[in-house]
């Protein structure tokens, strides 16, 4: 039956394993939390805000069903948007968005109705009533979901005051920052030079050279460390080798600062140098260097021009060469930097799995990312990890989400899938049941907590 206790679990062994991990605390080393929302700790104004207002996964599948943009990111009222979504929601069945939203409704709002054209208004009214309660404010929901620690994604200029406020309010370190310096590295962007100005203002200094830029980034890195940061995160279409020379990077820096646009090759030189310097900072502090590889950004021009980035126009590309630069990068930092590798293209997963195996305990696979973060994508990744790399070294599940309830629904989906994968291995005589139980606990909780020093 739909989302019952046997959801995603084929056999008794899988169900028994899941019972052992289902209530473990959630350790989420990578998400895109709205930290201000959690710090303000106000009731969500309506169900649309909680379920779909910030989720480009939802927008994309609704666009496929010809829902007009004004009912997604436009000026329609939240209730109108919700009802337009409900009108076509049965047509989303088979996509994980269909499961995630129903899991959120069922598990955390106590709503069992199936979302559709005849139930949209009923669910809107029920959800609105539940969300008005004091026990459904963001911080209370984090406790209900079982989040022990979560790592948001933050810019080097951020002051992190809201992180401090959340942790003080909740009485423990629940929310940690993650250092995401993409804007400082992406010299190809028209927003790069204005961003350098923001760094100057943040650290009250002039940035006239690459050395100055690295100094500013190091000041930010220290500040994040003082505020509980344990990892950096880097979104790259292809990895950078980290082997460029300072003098060559300086030439590119001067071109960009003069207002000219560097060539693609010149951009690559600068970015390779900067990423190497940032990895050195992580190595010094024992942070985890998270590398998200392969997102080809903003391929649909009308979305980018009309709405901006993160609006549903990013894709994967099987033909990217990720091994050549990654090999150089990992050799430079061999045995002195923890690295978590994520890829968007499922065809790259075997390469990352074998690279992880070759480079030992400090280089581990991150969870199936983004478009691979589905029952099919997770299962395929986990089956391959089990046969090529090691479950015990898996960097663990991350929500990678902008929605608070996703910390529950996405982790539940992952834990069920993982228990089903190893439960099947127990049933096939590949793993003793007690060993499988220990592996399940490690993958779902203690392993990521240990790897990320959380």
Image (tube, helix red, strand yellow):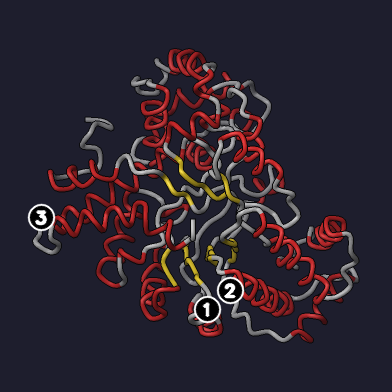
Give me the residue at 20% from left, 57% from top: 436
Label 3 residue SS: helix
| Dot label at residue 336 | 1
Work out how far the residue at label 2 is from the one at label 1, CA to CA, in angstroms: 6 Å
Give me the residue at 47% from left, 52% from top: 370
Q: Quadrant of residue 73?
A: top right
Classify 244 as above or below 205: below
Q: Residues within 10 Å of mark 1 (few under 14, many from 20)?
A: some
Which marked residue is nearer to the observer: mark 2 or mark 3? 2
Work out how far the residue at label 2 is from the one at label 3, CA to CA, in angstroms: 42 Å
Give me the residue at 46% from left, 33% from top: 143
Q: Say which of 265 and 245 sits in front.
A: 245
Residue 204 location (% of width, % of height): 89, 59
Residue 178 location (% of width, % of height): 60, 55
Q: Say which of 17 and 373 sits in front.
A: 17
Q: Residues within 10 Å of mark 2 (few under 14, many from 20)?
A: some
Q: Earlier in the sequence, mark 3 or mark 1?
A: 1
Give me the residue at 13% from left, 64% from top: 430
Residue 156 location (% of width, % of height): 72, 57
In the image: residue 179, left or right of residue 2: right
Classify 277 as above or below 108: below
Q: In what quadrant of the picture does the N terminus appear? A: top left
Residue 97 location (% of width, % of height): 42, 38
Classify 201 as above or below 410: below
**Which residue in the structure is indicated by mark 2?**
283
Q: Earlier in the sequence, mark 2 or mark 1?
A: 2
Residues at marks 3 and 1 touching, judged by CB atoms closer than 8 Å: no
**Which residue in the structure is indicated by mark 3?**
427
Residues at marks 2 and 1 touching, judged by CB atoms closer than 8 Å: yes
Q: Say which of 364 and 47 sits in front.
A: 364
Residues at marks 2 and 3 touching, judged by CB atoms closer than 8 Å: no
């Amino acid at each position: 039956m739909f989302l019952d206790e046997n959801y995603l679990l084929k056999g008794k062994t899988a169900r028994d394993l899941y019972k052992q991990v289902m209530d473990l605390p959630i350790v989420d080393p990578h998400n895109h939390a709205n930290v201000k929302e959690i710090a303000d700790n106000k009731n969500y104004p309506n169900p649309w805000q909680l379920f779909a207002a910030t989720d480009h996964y939802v927008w994309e599948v609704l666009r496929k069903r010809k829902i007009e943009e004004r009912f997604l990111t436009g000026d329609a009222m939240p209730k109108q948007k919700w009802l337009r979504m409900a009108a076509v929601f049965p047509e989303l069945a088979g996509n994980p968005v269909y499961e995630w939203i129903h899991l959120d409704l069922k598990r955390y709002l106590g709503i069992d109705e199936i979302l559709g054209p005849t139930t949209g208004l009923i669910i809107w009214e029920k959800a609105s009533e539940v969300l008005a309660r004091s026990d459904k404010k963001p911080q209370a929901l984090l406790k209900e979901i079982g989040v022990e620690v979560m790592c948001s994604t933050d810019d080097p200029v951020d002051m992190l005051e809201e992180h401090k406020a959340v942790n003080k309010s909740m009485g423990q370190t629940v929310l940690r920052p993650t250092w995401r310096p993409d804007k400082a590295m992406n010299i190809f962007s028209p927003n790069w030079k204005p961003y350098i100005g923001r760094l100057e203002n943040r650290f009250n200094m002039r940035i006239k050279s690459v050395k100055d830029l690295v100094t500013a980034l190091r000041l930010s890195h220290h500040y994040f460390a003082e505020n509980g940061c344990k990892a950096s995160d880097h979104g790259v279409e292809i990895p950078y080798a980290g082997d460029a020379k300072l003098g060559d990077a300086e030439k590119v820096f001067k071109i960009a600062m003069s207002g000219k646009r560097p060539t693609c090759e010149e951009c690559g030189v600068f970015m390779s140098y900067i990423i190497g310097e940032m990895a050195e900072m992580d190595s010094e502090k024992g942070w985890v260097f998270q590398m998200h590889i392969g997102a080809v950004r903003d391929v649909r021009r009308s979305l980018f021009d009309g709405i901006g980035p993160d609006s549903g126009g990013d894709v994967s590309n099987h033909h990217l060469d990720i091994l050549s630069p990654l090999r150089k990068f990992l050799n430079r930092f061999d045995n002195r930097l923890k690295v978590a590798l994520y890829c968007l293209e499922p065809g790259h997963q075997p390469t990352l799995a074998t690279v992880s195996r070759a480079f030992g305990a400090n280089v581990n696979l991150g969870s199936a990312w983004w478009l691979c973060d589905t029952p099919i994508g997770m299962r395929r990744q986990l089956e391959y990890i089990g046969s090529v790399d090691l479950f015990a070294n898996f960097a663990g599940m991350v929500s990678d989400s902008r929605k608070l309830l996703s910390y529950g629904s996405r982790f539940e989906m992952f834990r069920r899938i993982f228990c089903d994968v190893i439960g099947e291995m127990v049933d096939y005589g590949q793993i003793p049941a007690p060993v499988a139980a220990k592996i399940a606990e490690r993958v779902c909780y203690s392993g990521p907590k240990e790897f990320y020093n959380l």
